[in-house]
Image (tube, rainbow, N blue to C red):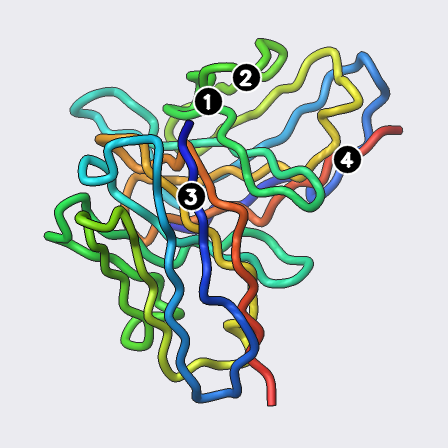
Amino acid sequence: EVQLLESGGGLVQPGGSLRLSCAASGFTFSDSDMTWVRQAPGKGLEWVSKIYFNSAKTFYADSVKGRFTISRDNSKNTVYLQMNSLRVEDTAVYYCAKEAPPTGWSDHWGQGTLVTVSS
Amino acid sequence: IVMTQSPDSLAVSLGERATINCRSSQSVLYSSNHRNYLAWYQQKPGQSPKLLIYWASTRQSGVPDRFSGSGSGTEFTLTISNLQSEDVAVYYCQQYHETPYSFGQGTRLDFK
């Protein structure tokens, strides 16, 4: 059974940093591209970032480019999202999702971790 | 690519049909493989999104056949036939034709 378990969310002040982690199991992690998607309270889904299975390429939404960094450790079956210079508008539930190879739909999602940016 | 869904919300009676539309600001059809890079997701209250359909019309394993997708290019439709109580949710379309990937704003489906 595919499982994705996010962690690392919490309350942070504007301008602060957080690192989210997503521990994967139940599939060949090193074969799968991974994605982060967020959802602000009461709002819709917003695609945030993607990393190739081998870390060769990364992609970002314009809203987070230059502030967020996605990475992965295939030896630990974990994908990360380093979030710097956080803004109030980054407040959201952050979901980790596995992409179905070889293309971009997300066939499994984690339960999400809440990031709250507030002073 | 901007994805726009319509309507924002709709109410349908049990057993009836619900139709949700999704329009992309540019084509998500790759001519090389004739595939539309369009997926549909369902999100029930308090839950994570769940994949329903990919390639615009292919049902994910385990998804009931009352869910169907159609369309090509820039115009797509999700149809839910014989609406059941468990279908109350918000539905999103997503293009994965190019990064940054993008979602529609969502359509809330309730009972009439």
Label 3 secondary element:
strand
Q: Tell me the kind of residue under disc 4.
A: Leu
Q: Closer to the camera: disc 1 or disc 4?
A: 4
Residue A40 badge: none
Q: Closer to the camera: disc 4 or disc 2?
A: 2
Label 1 vs label 4: CA separation? 20 Å
Read off the residue under disc 4.
B10
Label 3 vs label 4: CA separation? 32 Å
Label 3 vs label 1: CA separation? 32 Å
**Between B91 and A23, which is closer to the camera in this rendering?**
A23
Name the subunit of mark 2: B
Number of labels in the image equals: 4
Q: Tell me the kind of residue under disc 1.
A: Gly
First of labels 2, 1 by sequence position: 2
Q: Closer to the camera: disc 3 or disc 4?
A: 3
**Between A107 and B25, which is closer to the camera in this rendering?**
A107
Residue B63 badge: 2
The x, y position of residue B19, in whole percent, is: 66, 24
**Between A78 and B41, which is closer to the camera in this rendering?**
A78
Q: Is residue A61 above or below residue A109?
A: below
Q: Closer to the camera: disc 2 or disc 3?
A: 3
Q: Quadrant of residue B34?
A: top left
Label 2 vs label 3: CA separation? 20 Å
First of labels 1, 4 by sequence position: 4
